[in-house]
Image (cartoon, rainbow, N blue to C red):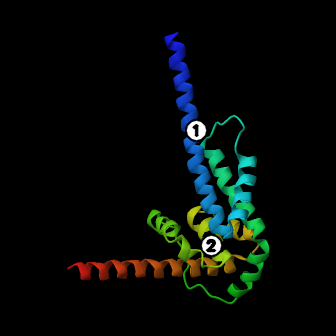
Amino acid sequence: MISTAHENRSAVAARDDVRSNFSQCLTGLEWLAFFLTGDDGVATACVIDACGVALPSDNALDNSMLQRARYGTIRTAVQMQRVRIAQVSSTYECRMCVHRTHAELSPETIELLIEENSLVTKLDVLCRCALVICGIEKRPLQEAASLLGVTQSVLRAAYCKALEYLDVIQCERFRDACDYAAVCN
């Protein structure tokens, strides 16, 4: 009797862990989809579509399923934004990027991206997609360009613009912190 009660509590605790992990995953997917699309309704549809394909019905979550859900969310968001991506891509055809390569986003920069979401969403959809696919998801440029339906040079230029914008935000934060420190002294 006691062992059965213990097993039941263990099963309930395991289900609660799965729900907690799924809830965290869902929150992350919702942020990701909204960041890419800029629309709550479209973002919700992206997450529902991705989760329906990637997540099992038996509530067993593992890293590969969560990665598939993330990539599925990105793929769906990109498909829903395909026309807008095509429209803005022409603005990057003549933009030159002077860097040989761009680094993936550091954990600190990803945190900045999340904290300054309202500023970063002012970037166009191609820049936001480049940040997510190349910077956060660390996908190769060729794969990202193919997913977005643009050339690698267009994607490189959009990623460059997005990184420059993040640098400006970081500099403004630093300046504000220094101004605050000067006022406090």
* Residue most extreme to the bottom: 94
Query: At which x and y percent is residue 84?
Result: 75, 77
Identified at 42% across, 81% down, the residue is 172
Q: Is residue 52 above or below residue 178?
A: above
Identified at 58% across, 82% down, the residue is 161
* Residue most extreme to the right: 83
Count of numbered badges drawn on the protein: 2
Judge the density around disc 2: few (<14), some (14-19), many (≥20) Cα neighbours within 10 Å.
many
Name the one closer to the observer, 32 or 45. 45
The amino acid type of the residue labelled 2 equals Arg
Residue 19 in which image quadrant: top right
Relative horizontal placement of residue 179, taking residue 121 as reference (left or right): left
Identify the residue position indicated by label 1 in the image.
18
Name the one closer to the observer, 147 or 2. 2
CA gap between label 2 and label 1 equals 30 Å
Q: Residue 102: give its label.
A: none
Q: Residue 128: give its label.
A: 2
Judge the density around disc 1: few (<14), some (14-19), many (≥20) Cα neighbours within 10 Å.
some
Query: At which x and y percent is residue 69?
Result: 67, 51
Residue 102 in which image quadrant: bottom right
Residue 7 in which image quadrant: top right
Q: Secondary structure at mark 2?
A: helix
Identified at 31% across, 83% down, the residue is 179
Name the one closer to the observer, 142 or 23. 23
> Which badge, 2 or 1, comes first in the chain's sequence?
1
Q: Secondary structure at mark 1?
A: helix
Relative horizontal placement of residue 68, taking residue 24 as reference (left or right): right
The C terminus is located in which quarter?
Answer: bottom left
Query: At which x and y percent is residue 5?
Result: 52, 17
The amino acid type of the residue labelled 1 equals Val
